[in-house]
Amino acid sequence: EAQVTQNPRYLITVTGKKLTVTCSQNMNHEYMSWYRQDPGLGLRQIYYSMNVEVTDKGDVPEGYKVSRKEKRNFPLILESPSPNQTSLYFCASSLNTPSSYNSPLHFGNGTRLTVT
Amino acid sequence: AQSVTQLDSQVPVFEEAPVELRCNYSSSVSVYLFWYVQYPNQGLQLLLKYLSGSTLVKGINGFEAEFNKSQTSFHLRKPSVHISDTAEYFCAVTLRNQGGKLIFGQGTELSVKP
């Protein structure tokens, strides 16, 4: 089954403790992206990647890192999490960039992160 | 820079009533437009998209949207809603052939009551 898989679904951690949220897709998509969803703010893009070893900042990259060493995986790293990073995170992928013709995003089921 | 505004944060309706969820965007260049739906505790699913051609776009579950270039709008409609349509709906825009950014609106919570 074609899908985007995020792990874990839920994560509670403390301020300053490094964590990684994994994202994997099995559709051979070139484009992958991370969003955070906060009430009243919709989804805001954190980082995206147009191919292996190519990553770019989205609108809210501060406090996050990503890597794209292989096509299927796009982990999100929080080196020193803070309470303002408490949010619902989504990974998404598409065949080409979203601005390409007919390349809609496929989303994972989300990771709810709480930083205390 | 492009932006998306969803004019209603919450829309309560009764079952079998029609509904319209409003979306306006701002961009000086050509865009692609999308509506996504998020059911409780799930990720987002594509509902429909406007890429080119006919301005009336039909999607899944009986939804449709109309692209209005002069009013820079892409409103979502359904003539008769069901309880199962209760979800959050997001409008999104990207610039044609210009990179990897997809900008989402703030979301509209559709609540269908019996």
Image: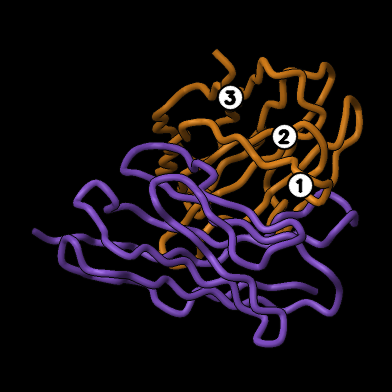
Chain colours: A orange, B purple
Q: Extreme left residue here?
A: B114
Q: Residue furthest front?
A: B54
As measured in the structure, the alpha-carbon distance from the residue carrying label 3 to the one carrying label 1 is 16 Å
Q: Are the residues flagged by discs 1 and 2 in contact, CB closer than 8 Å?
A: yes
Instruction: Give the secondary structure at mark 3.
Output: strand
Q: For residue A28, which quarter of the picture?
A: top right
Q: Is residue A7 above or below residue B36?
A: above
Q: Residues within 10 Å of mark 3 (few under 14, many from 20)?
A: many
Instruction: Look at label 3 and name its amino acid.
Output: Val
Q: How many marks?
A: 3
Q: Report the chain holding disc 3.
A: A
User: Which residue is found at the position 47% from the left and 66% from the top?
Assistant: B76
Q: Which residue is mark 3?
A: A4
Look at the numbered disc 1 and give the secondary structure of its residue. Answer: loop
What residue appears at the point 68 percent right and 49 percent down from the top-left corner? A46
Residue B96 x %, y %: 85, 59
Q: Are marks 2 and 3 on the same chain?
A: yes
Amino acid found under the numbered disc labelled 1: Pro
Q: Which callout, 2 or 3, points to the residue nearer the camera? A: 2
Q: Earlier in the sequence, mark 3 or mark 1?
A: 3
Q: Residue at x 56, y 41 (%)?
A: A81
- Residue A98: which numbered mark, if any? 1
Disc 2 secondary structure class: strand
Where is residue A70? Give x, y as percent. 82, 16
Q: Amino acid at mark 2?
A: Ser
Q: At which x and y percent is residue B47?
A: 51, 48
B94 vs A98: above or below = below
Looking at the image, is mark 3 or mark 1 nearer the viewer?
1
